[in-house]
Image (cartoon, grey):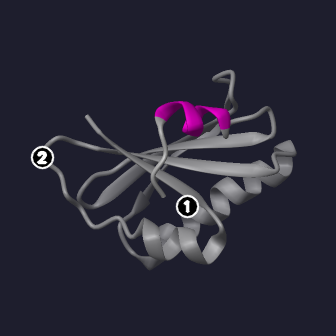
Amino acid sequence: MQSTQNERINQITSSTLIVGVDIAKFKHVARAQDYRGVEFGKPIAFENNREGFEYFVSWFKGLGAEQGFQDVIVGLLHGICTDYRFSERNWGNARNILFYKRRE
């Protein structure tokens, strides 16, 4: 999905849980916040495998349900020299999760 920065920003509302993920080779780190930057839960680390992704999805879905969020946007931060295989296309499409990638 091609969109401008303003279009992406306009998709974030008070009912949106924003999840940021720092991608690494073996373990990724995620944290969740609302549109004001208020953090929910503690950041988590999860492995780059099926079990890790299942844990990640259940973590942010649980936070979203607990806090009453209706939407989730996941942002991925890749390092300049990284091209690790975070399989967001398979996970996001199957679960109606919107992913955005950004390189440092």
Label ID, residue 29: none
- Asked if the stretch drawn in magenta spans residue 7, the answer is yes
Residue 104: which quarter of the image?
top left
Residue beneath disc 1: 56
* Category of crowding for the residue at label 1, using alpha-carbon neighbours closer than 10 angstroms: few (below 14), some (14–19), many (at least 20): many
Residue 89: percent from left, percent from top: 45, 70
**Residue at 27 percent of width and 52 percent of height:** 24
Nearer to the camera, 8 or 15: 8
**Residue at 65 percent of width and 67 percent of height:** 96
Q: What stretch is highlighted in magenta?
A: 5-10
- Asked if the stretch drawn in magenta spans residue 34, the answer is no
**Residue at 67 percent of width and 40 percent of height:** 11
Label ID, residue 81: 2
Q: Is residue 29 left or right of residue 104?
A: right
Residue 6: which quarter of the image?
top right
Residue 93: percent from left, percent from top: 56, 73
Q: Earlier in the sequence, mark 1 or mark 2?
A: 1
Q: In front: mark 1 or mark 2?
A: 2
Residue 50: percent from left, percent from top: 45, 78
Query: Helix, strand, or loop for circle 2?
Result: loop
Q: Give the vertical position of 91 relative to 74 (above or below).
A: below
Nearer to the camera, 6 or 12: 6
Amino acid bearing label 1: Phe
Q: In this view, does 71 lie to the left or right of 28?
A: right
* Category of crowding for the residue at label 2, using alpha-carbon neighbours closer than 10 angstroms: few (below 14), some (14–19), many (at least 20): few
Query: Helix, strand, or loop for circle 1?
Result: helix
Q: Give the vertical position of 85 relative to 94 (above or below).
A: above
Q: What main secondary structure does the magenta stretch of the protein show?
A: helix
Amino acid bearing label 2: Cys
Mark 1 and mark 2 residues within 8 Å of each other at the beta carbon: no
Q: How many angstroms separate mark 1 from mark 2 (CA)?
A: 24 Å
